[in-house]
Image (cartoon, rainbow, N blue to C red):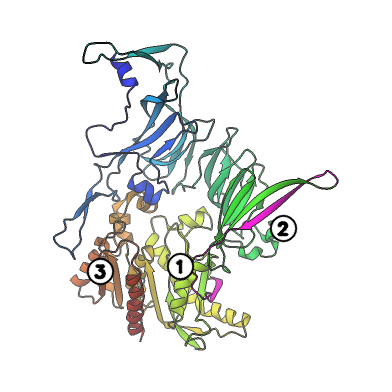
Amino acid sequence: DEEAGDAISVVASAPQNGEWKIGLAEFAAGEEMDRYDGFWWSPDSKYVLFETYDESPEPIWHLSDPANPTNPAQANRYPQALTANADVRLTLLELGYDSDNCCYGAIANEVQWDHESYEYLAAVSWREGHDPIILVQDRLQQHDQVLAIHVGEPIATMRDAENGFTDDNGDEVETFSIAIPEYAEGERPGTTRVLEEHGNDYWLDLIHGTPAFTPDGRLICAMNDMDVDTNRLTVDGTPFTPAGLQVREVLDVTDDDVLCVVQRTPEILPESDLPFLWQSNASDHDARSFDVVSIRYDGTWEPLTYAPGQWSMSRAGNGCVVTGRGMDDATVQMQHCMNIATTDENGTDVASMVVAPIENHAETPGFTPNVHFTRLGERELYTAIVLPSSDSEYAHEAILPVLMKPYGGPGFQQVIESQSFYWDAQWWADQGYIVVTTDGRGTTGRGPQWDRAIYETMKSVTLEDQIDAVRALPEALEALAGENAAANVPQPDLSRVAMIGWSYGGFLSALAVLEAPETFAAACAGAPPTDWTLYDTHYTERYLGLDPAVYERNSIIADAPQLDRPLMLIHGFADDNVTIAHSLRLSQALMATGRKHTFLPLTGITHMTNDETVAENLLILQRDFLAEALG
């Protein structure tokens, strides 16, 4: 029986055509969707759900090592914006076990969904007692579907496949019988049903940990609630998390509550509505603080972390582990907390919590950054100002140049209540700068409307917010001096303002001297994405769409003839995320128009500088470049 023979063998091979990979997450998933897995075991270990993808539709890119010309260039597929993505598929592998619990084979069932309309597999979740669920997105990420994958219950009738063989002497070896399941029409494993659909005129955010089933079968999903400007959670389609608590990650789901990381928006959720645990430091629980809270399905909630900071938690049974860091902590703090039930002398049940710190022996920098938080301009931009330390030679200067040090791009904040974010900024301040990091529109933490203000206009909007921050700086520093009479607070020299940054921060730095030379006197741009058609699909098309004219408008290549300020470009030859082609194209355009600039290529360096010596020398070279540029 040909069908029976197929059924008892492992049918998990990819199609013969194309460039298929099995059990891995494709590049776009790992780089942009926070999905790094390519296979998932069922809770009962009877099934395996695995990804296969064909990346042959994607263009081939070549990364070379110019310092070693005998080495061939490495060819890689890359999901370049405005080109094709990998073809992603899922297979549900049904494992067969004999009476001794030995696996004798498997049946492969392709998971079915509308691949043409929804080409991104964004999330997979499989909870005990429930079918696996997946989240699929369309190309522009404006529509998604939550799908349940039917695992399947076989009908009563079973077919037997006789298995056996004869040896070299022609003697028959004992045969055995294996039951092959049959399914009713439409009940075969791998079929899907739509649980929920969502839409947004701009894009839909992915919230790690969603979608998910509660143990009793209710569906938890993420929701960009534009009406109340809050990233919320829904249970069976009904929003239940409070307006003003921006949900960033779901850590655990039970029948009683959802454990999640949130940021508070004070304009929506005022201090008067906060629980008692936060009352003493309410003003610091805002977009700068990643707090862990428990939210029940009736909307009531309670914080599980007290100090503002960057926190996370894992929990199981009666215990949990809290990890994170605040402004007072040089190292990551970790605590194991256990709820203990005891009985007092009167026989009354008493619940108590035992907290045990877990030691951290990591090195510390040996100093505490001199950080001052404020909000600048009419948009009240969250800003961190780092001043020279008390033992710096610049500690008592009355006026200092300004160094803007942003990331500034969508999806990532730098103004956070976590000390480690400001260690390198303190080094720069001690070189004689007022160091300013401002989170402008698009940098998350302030609601979906704030995030989407950059849609199709990343370039102009993000630069505008950095300019506004510079203009508002003198007033903010005067206010800071009034609040800290005993401390020296220098005033900014706005004729000497420089910007440094990496990745999107590098793009913003180059843009600053190209389009706002009246504000920015010099810049160092590290690994800048200068031409957005050279970046990946899932990130870039989320913000810029599919119109080539929008990409041209947001590129900085055409701005090259405008450069009349000192600019240093820095880029690693081995960068496989923002390839060195970005800086080479800008440098070529600058050369074509006779614009003087400095280009520092880094051999063997990827998108992040992973060599300590190179990282140290990069700081020194940038410091000396800016010192000369600013006079």
Q: Is residue 368 magenta?
A: yes
Kind of residue indicated by mark 3:
Pro
Q: On the image, numbered disc 2 is attached to which residue?
A: 276
Look at the image and say whether residue 49 sits in the magenta stretch.
no
Q: Is residue 535 visible?
A: yes
Q: Quadrant of the C terminus?
A: bottom left
Question: Is 544 positioned to the left or the right of 210 in the image?
Answer: left
Q: Is residue 68 left or right of residue 269?
A: left
Q: Earlier in the sequence, mark 1 or mark 3?
A: 1
Q: CA distance from mark 1 to mark 2?
A: 35 Å
Q: Which mark is residue 199?
A: none
Q: Is 331 in front, or is 217?
A: 331
Q: Secondary structure at mark 2?
A: helix
Segment colored magenta: 346-375
Please tell me which residue is depicted at 65% across the width and 40% down the height of the picture: 256
Which residue was labeled with disc 3? 601
* Alpha carbons under labels 1 and 3: distance apart: 30 Å
The answer to whether residue 90 is above or below residue 228 is: above
Label 3: element kind: strand
Q: Nearer the viewer, mark 1 or mark 2?
A: 2
| Residue at 43% from the left image edge and 37% from the top image edge | 40
Q: Would you name the residue on which mark 1 appears? A: 465
